[in-house]
Image (cartoon, rainbow, N blue to C red):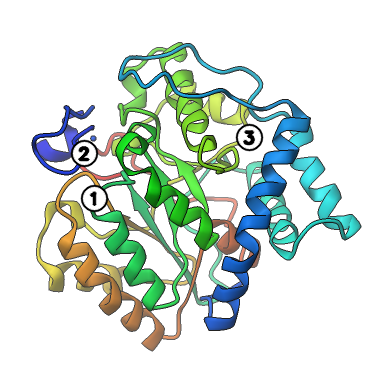
Amino acid sequence: MHDERRTSIAWAGGDAAPGRARPVDADVFTRRRRRAAATALVALVAVISLVAGIAVGSSSGSGTARAPRASLAPAGFFARIQELAGSGTGSFQARELAAENAAINRTLAYTPFVRVAGSERREIALTFDDGPGPYTPGVLAALERMHAPATFFEVGFMLRWFHASTSAIIARGDPIGDHTELHQPMSELTRAEQRSELLDQAATISQYGAPFPRLFRPPYGVYNATTLALLHKYGMLMVMWTVDSNDYLRPGVPSIVHTVLAGARPGAIILMHDAGGDRTETIEALPKIITGLRARGYRLVTVPRLLLDDPAPRDQEGVPSSSLGAG
């Protein structure tokens, strides 16, 4: 058990901050198109959200648990996006979002979680936990230079200081998943507390234009039957990982790079971190990882695109349900 990961999150740019409770690799043309469409997408989702009645209100700004929000993700919300996409209304980005949401729905029809996607295509998803934080801009800059997409699992509490990075992620067109509001181990919470952790995070990111999160990653990799029941209720897919980079241990850049490349396989989901501690090693390792994966014939995609391009197998491999130290 690593103290930095197990203690609870909210350092905001140094030790002095208040205490913490912790399809295809895009080429230049695709990245430019995604960025150009991002503003239209945010506006579209905002309008649909208002019509569907899913506005969740603003965060109280308190670190204590708040009353959970109700009816955040009615089934009609995603059906409406798909309707607009199918009718030709809306942008390319909206049609892409609808296709990816449909892929998540298809996955949820046979499994509540994924650890790895299919192996027919040489595609891999990089994912980042615990942000946004002071090192998130460095991670985003490295991804941008390499024209690489990624999926981010954000802690709602951290947006109090670092919401500019959340806006930048949305502008890139990368998905933002739920990593709870306060980074609490879900299996140690009551049902009401787990619900608050999920919905408060969704409410927080919605203030900056992010749609309701379809993906969830449990802090420390821990969850229980209550967690799965709530995820089912809100139409959220739990995303675990195939390869843990162990970057949170700060083992050195060569070690991080070696761990990721050695574990790479078609359909893999790679766990990394953009916050929760010093992430300079992660930032330095990223270009080497991306270059190494591409040299091996892999293309980088987001988790929703991974599921769309190469659906996850029905029988998922064992998932760590009590893994304190990652995620």
- Circles 1 and 2, Cβ within 8 Å, touching? The answer is yes
Q: Quadrant of the C terminus?
A: top left
Question: Residue 248 location in percent, x, y?
Answer: 18, 51
Spatial CA distance of label 3 from label 2 is: 31 Å
Q: Answer left or right for 189 relative to 283.
A: right
Residue hosting label 1: 134
Q: Amino acid under label 3? A: Gly
Residue hosting label 2: 12
Question: Residue 75 location in percent, x, y?
Answer: 75, 32
Mark 2 nearby-residue class (10 Å; few <14, some 14–19, many ≥20): many
Q: Amino acid under label 2? A: Ala
Q: Disc 1 or disc 3, which is closer to the eye?
A: 1
Residue hosting label 3: 235
Q: Secondary structure at mark 2?
A: loop
Earlier residue among tags 3 and 2: 2
The residue sitting at 48% across, 37% down in the picture is 205
The residue sitting at 66% across, 21% down in the picture is 71
